[in-house]
């Protein structure tokens, strides 16, 4: 694993190293320590004097037909719902399971508390005229138009209202007849509205085929976005293992991950035949 700014940029890593005294006492070696621990390989020259960074990893492989079944379920019970896509139902599922696992993970909320869903949409092909394929850089639109009460999310119809709310936000923002940037002047005000509120954010897209990238070293074995660390966001991309499936990533304590994993397995088991 190459050593670089993205490897050492996590606040959690720095906080842990400072508490252990490693960062202050061994400045010249802390980059190597982080690199080796994150890559899960043997320590440099067999040196075992450094303690490992705390970590917990859980990987769930779900039925590949589950995503399609979830879309059919939403469309059957909400036939007028806008933009019921893989992105919509996946985000709705995660949003609902966040709400359902809040109490057991120590992040309990009152039923009347408002929660927001936000993401950024790629504008490059959606401008008129579109940007050329050779354009290098970001061109994204901020979408903060999905909001529901905590009680609605964890209720019996949580997946339906969540998918409906997210779909409406996508339809009104991304596919607006006035253009995807039509309300860019309101983004700051919309963002300020979420200050101090629970916000579920998504980074990435089902269109991002990260596991197909090859710089000459072969395809990536596993993708982990550092931007989800302590931010409350999730990462989303195409799965490495199977066509048509998606991969989500989230970061948190073992209790948090366990609670979420239990919620999503139980929820899908009760919801889908």
Image (cartoon, rainbow, N blue to C red):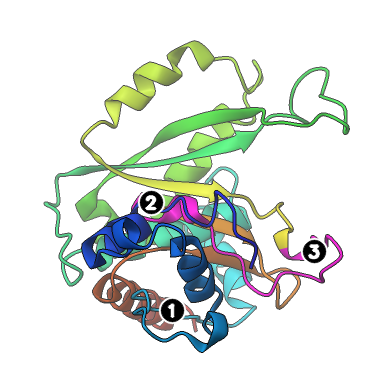
Residue depicted at 25% across the width and 63% down the height = 21
Q: Position of residue 99 (x, y in %)?
A: 27, 60
Q: Position of residue 41 (x, y in %)?
A: 57, 83
Tell me if label 3 and label 2 are in contact, CB under 8 Å. Answer: no
Residue position marked by numbered label 2 in the rendering: 161
Q: Position of residue 198 (x, y in %)?
A: 26, 44
Q: Is residue 218 magenta?
A: yes
Residue position marked by numbered label 1 in the rendering: 57
Camera-nearest label, 3 or 2: 3
Q: Which mark is residue 212?
A: 3
The overriding secondary structure of the stretch rendered in magenta is loop
- 242 relative to 179, above or below: below
- 239 relative to 265, above or below: above
Q: Is residue 13 left or right of residue 172?
A: left
Tell me if label 3 and label 1 are in contact, CB under 8 Å. Answer: no
Q: Is residue 196 left or right of residue 211?
A: left
Write the start and end of the magenta stretch as one range: 211-231
Q: Position of residue 51 (x, y in %)?
A: 34, 79
Judge whether residue 158 can be spotted in this image: no
């Amino acid at each position: 694993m190459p050593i670089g700014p993205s490897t050492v940029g996590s606040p959690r890593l720095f906080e842990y190293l400072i508490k252990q005294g490693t960062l202050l006492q061994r400045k010249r070696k802390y980059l190597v320590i982080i690199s080796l621990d994150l890559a899960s390989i043997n320590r440099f020259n067999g040196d075992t004097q450094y303690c490992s960074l705390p970590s917990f990893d859980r990987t769930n492989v779900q039925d590949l037909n589950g995503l399609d079944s979830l879309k059919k379920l939403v469309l059957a019970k909400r036939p007028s719902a806008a933009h019921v896509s893989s992105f919509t139902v996946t985000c709705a599922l995660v949003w609902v399971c966040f709400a359902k696992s809040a109490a057991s993970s120590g992040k309990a909320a009152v039923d009347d508390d408002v929660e927001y869903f936000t993401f950024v949409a790629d504008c490059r092909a959606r401008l008129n005229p579109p940007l050329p394929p050779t354009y290098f850089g970001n061109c994204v639109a901020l979408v903060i138009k999905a909001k529901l009460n905590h009680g609605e999310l964890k209720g019996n119809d949580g997946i339906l209202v969540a998918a409906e709310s997210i779909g409406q936000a996508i339809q009104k923002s991304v596919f607006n007849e006035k253009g995807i940037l039509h309300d860019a002047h309101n983004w700051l005000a919309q963002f300020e509205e979420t200050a101090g509120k629970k916000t579920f954010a998504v980074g990435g897209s089902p269109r991002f085929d990260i596991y197909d990238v090859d710089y000459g070293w072969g395809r990536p074995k596993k993708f982990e976005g550092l931007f989800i660390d302590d931010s409350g966001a999730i990462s989303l991309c195409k799965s490495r293992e199977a066509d048509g499936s998606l991969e989500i990533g989230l970061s948190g304590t073992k209790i948090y991950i366990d609670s979420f994993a239990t919620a999503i397995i139980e929820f899908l088991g009760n919801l889908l035949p």
